Image: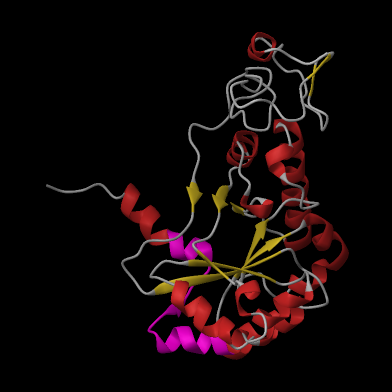
Amino acid sequence: MEVTRRQALTAAAGAAVGAAGAVGAVRVKEHLDESTPLPFYGSPVSAVRPDRSPPSAAGASVVWSGPGDRRRVALTFDDGPHPDWTPRVLEALEAEDVPATFFCLGRNVRDHGDLHRGSVGRHELANHTFDHPDLGRYDWSRCRDEIERTTQLMKKTYGIAPTLFRPPYGHLGGAALLAATEAGLTSVLWSAQAREDLVAGRPDGIVDDIASQVRPGSIVLAHDTGSDDRLVTIDRLPAIIRRLRDDGYTFATVSDLLATSRASATTPSHT
């Protein structure tokens, strides 16, 4: 039967919310009316543990950009490593002497991890889940599994654990935020991105489009694998870097970009 508003409010703590929306033995409507709240515990949007135990973290950190007091920008690449484009991205970055942050999929680290062995200490390698699911549909335990599997594999492969996390599609529900925070990861979104769809038919326009979005502290989203239209950005990466340099920008990893704001937040003021 369909769950009522009262049943949704009083669903048993810890009941798993599956793809069909099951709460215990009761099925939640696939598309709840906007006046019907989701279950308090165990839903993808719930930022509390399903069993109502206390979280292991006191607070979360989510960022879209770095501080805007310096003309610095962070280039980020999602979904690799993969032999189709990752070597091309690394080659372009090396030629331009630019560091970047790569949000890696665990399954690609498993299959193609060697592609980034030379990146440690030069670029930043971060967590982008294992299988690239929509975490906005996952409960806390599944979000935790996607994140922890990837972190452990990256630590084993590269000898260092990631400190940053980017949710696939930018979907950061409460369960995903809690899981990432308890894993000690800062959740990173973006404030500028490669919009290949806007330059269809005039691929060189990607340079001006990215430059028009960038501001001091911007975190720029791009990809180092995926559909062929994304090659518009990869093929013009040197031109994008040079254009931003001409505009007075320097480049940093995301963690380096954020370091100034974190240092300011922890430095006591003197009056």
Residue 44: x and y in percent read 68, 32
Residue 203: x and y in percent read 64, 86
- Please determine whether, in this image, residue 206 is positioned above or below residue 219: below
Residue 244 magenta-drawn?
yes
* Residue 158 sits in quarter: bottom right
Q: Main secondary structure of the magenta part?
A: helix
What is the span of residues highlighted in magenta in the rendered image?
239-258
- Please determine whether, in this image, residue 18 is positioned above or below residue 238: above
Residue 122 magenta-drawn?
no
Horizontal side of 168 relative to 145 (left or right) equals: left
Residue with the most extreme left position: 271
Horizontal side of 74 relative to 164 (left or right) equals: left
Q: Is residue 97 visible?
A: no
| Quadrant housing the N terminus | top right
Residue at (63%, 17%) from the top-left corner? Answer: 52
Residue 267: x and y in percent read 29, 50
- Please determine whether, in this image, residue 159 is positioned above or below residue 149: below
Horizontal side of 213 relative to 113 (left or right) equals: left
The total number of labels drawn is 0
Which one is nearer the viewer's eye here, 255 or 168? 168
Q: Is residue 210 visible?
A: yes
Residue 69: x and y in percent read 31, 67
Residue at (34%, 48%) from the top-left corner? Answer: 266
Residue at (69%, 14%) from the top-left corner? Answer: 13
Residue at (61%, 38%) from the top-left corner? Answer: 173
- Please determine whether, in this image, residue 258 is positioned above or below residue 210: above
